[in-house]
Image (cartoon, rainbow, N blue to C red):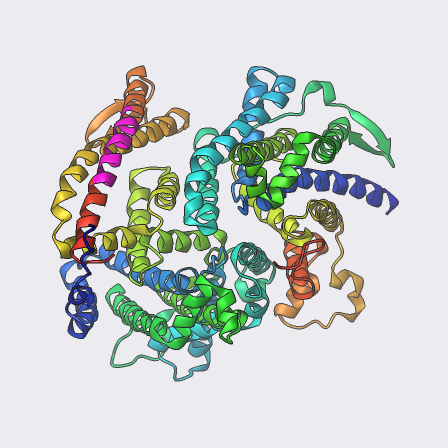
Amino acid sequence: MSEAPTAPRPAAQTPSGGRAGFYAIWLIAAAALIVLPLIFSSGGSLTSFSLIGIAIVFALSYNILLGQTGLLSFGHAVQYGLGGFLAVHVMNAVASYNWPLPLPLIPLAGGIGGLAFAIVIGWVMTKRAGTVFAMISLGIGELVASSSLILRSVFGGEAGITTDRTALPHVFGWTFGSQLQVYYLIAFWTMISAIAMYALTRTPLGRICNAVRDNPERVEFIGYDPHVVRYLAYGFSGFFAGVAGGLAAINFEIANSAYLGATQSGLVLFAAFIGGTSHFFGPILGAIVVTYLQLDLTDLTTVWQLYFGIIFIGIVMFAPGGIAGLLMMHRPLIRAGTLGTVIPSYLVAALPTLALALGVILSIETVARYTSSEGDGNVINLLGVPFNATAPTTWLAAAVLVIGGFLIARLSWRRVAEAWDRAATSARDRGYLA
Amino acid sequence: MLELIVISTLNGVLFGMLLFLLSSGLTVIFSMMGVLNFAHASFYMLGAFFGYQLSKWVGFWPALVLAPLLVGAIGMAVERYGLRNTHRHGHVAELLLTFGLAFAIEEIVSMIWGKSPVDYRVPAALDFPAFTVFSTNYPAYKIFMLAVSIAIFVALLIVLKKTRVGLIVQAALTHPNMVGHLGHNVGRVFMLVFGVGSALAGLAGVIAGPSLVTQSDMASLLGPILFVVIVFGGLGSLPGAFIASLLIGLIQTFAVALNGSLASAFGPLDPSLGPSVLTDIWNVTIAQIAPILPYVLLVLMLIFRPMGLLGARES
């Protein structure tokens, strides 16, 4: 005599809130963009917000490739950079020929730059997906970045090409001389681009992109050519990357070969992946986190890029869904009300994990100070506690924190997994599916 | 002119063999595990820096053996504790893991040894001109590099084609499950192949370090060219990688040696336009476009023969 499994309640599966909640999120986002500079009005935070806005557009455009279509690109900065260069050239042309083109439309020129390049090169690039595409994108990225140093008249060599955003025709008395006005311009385009890219995911094209990502063979069987679908996705992605490049050109009033380089391509990959590629809002989170880290870590430590790499490796190994994936994992548990059973084990795991993280930071900083010949002393200030980089006690403390933290963290995370399984099972029994 | 051709051919073959030391490991790892190891060039860089550090402590000859072993051990650890755990998340996650690793290794190296080139010298025993061609002294160290790479190439060929180990590796390339069913530990085979591939990259670093520049950006400079080589030769094809390595080695060396440009060849026909793209192209020398030639070749290859030189048709 076996008990029949209780059928999941269908009512529990329909998303709560529905349409009103969906529009509320976008309205809240728009309101937040408008209100933010009024709360944090210092020049530094305005610059940060502007950079974050550009990074959001760029990371979302990257996710059209990686998250939606499954194309891993190592040369996405090419479209970004070419968009930036075209925007700068258009701005200079507008200023010198007195064309009636106001500054707020310039990002469109950037988008056209990115799109044009994607149209020209995309057909060859998207012939194959997977690893081959990744390698080709890397090669094309290097090709364009190196060529930009040769074609001096277009790319301005090492120095780049400068422009003046205030020289363009003014609309409604906005000169865009101040960072606040530039911020609102960027915020406007960030909002528009995000809405457009979200809408794209809901179109039949967006859906077939997902299908190409998951199973290109079956897509062929239902009569679509995966190559064409990848090409279209590449074009859209190129357009929005170009918009981001155009925004950057407006913000910095310069375009140089660094825009096109491997570093920029790597950063957008980090942003999209750390945020999480399987949810639309993932790259937005990632762009915020990465830009924030980039701005703040540089002040704190000389080896900030190493921390970047370590965070990225950690995410790839332990949370391939990114931050968004981690957050969304908890949704069914919250709905079913079983999250409470997991939290104690989280708290238990937090302590050794923190110790491990501190140990890693201490080791890195110790090594960095030990090997650097610059005369800023050997004393490390970690959370207000001074450590001496040459003292054996520091090395010992770091080793104990790393090894001890690792061993205990591994045990306690195993506990978390068990508690998690129990909570997820009971949530499933109540009909809340992940 | 003849002098230039002889010297450039020698240097080109040398660079090509060096590329093959790296691309052979990369190709075998790729066809076996489906992972394109982004950190392969970083292992090369680690080899160079370990070689530098060890030859300061114990001398060049022990370092020549120890440094590749060390790099190989690191490679095995990466496979065992990194890639094997990431495997269930798919190839993209594995590729990204090696990408993150390449990034982290570059940062660690520049943290420990600094960003400027280190003083990694040719060992005294090899610091003499081997022979003189057309009044140019050809250094003995370069001959040594060539000899080592050819020796490794021959050894690899023999191991892969003539021994039992090579047989198992070859079988595991195409039929890993069957090899597993026959009682071989495929996981260990993968780990060993990854280790050997990394060790070869490390060896290339140790011997190339004194001749080229040992610097923390040497991985990011060579890495993309390495990928061009294996895509150009056909992904997963060892003979293809060999031909592509030599070809790209020769092309780059010859291009660097040539100083001609369109302007110098057709000087009297100078259209004398204002500063524009055309004048940039008109005046650029072949030596200046040497760094982008491999990528141009890559694009051309993709247009006309997407599977690469000796690659199999897309499965």
Residue drawn 35% across the image and 41% down it: A314
Identify the image quadrant of the C terminus of chain B: bottom right
Quarter of image, res A408: top left
Residue A395 quadrant: top left
Q: Which residues are magenta?
A: A404-418
Left/right of residue B235 with respect to residue A17 in the rendered view: right
- Residue B117 visible: no
> Is residue A344 in view?
yes
Nearer the observer, A84 or A79 = A79
Inspect the magenta stretch and tell me whether residue A427 lies in it: no
Q: Main secondary structure of the magenta part?
A: helix
Residue A415: x, y in percent? 22, 35
- Front residue of A73 and A287: A73
Position of A312 relative to A174 (above/below): above
**Does the magenta segment cover residue A405?**
yes
Residue most toward the front? A1
| Horizontal and vertical percent position of residue A56 | 32, 61
Q: Is residue B4 above or below residue A248?
A: above
Q: Residue B271, how many percent across, how many down?
A: 72, 73
Q: Position of residue B314 (x, y in %)?
A: 62, 59
Asked whether, in this view, residue B185 is left or right of residue B312, the answer is left
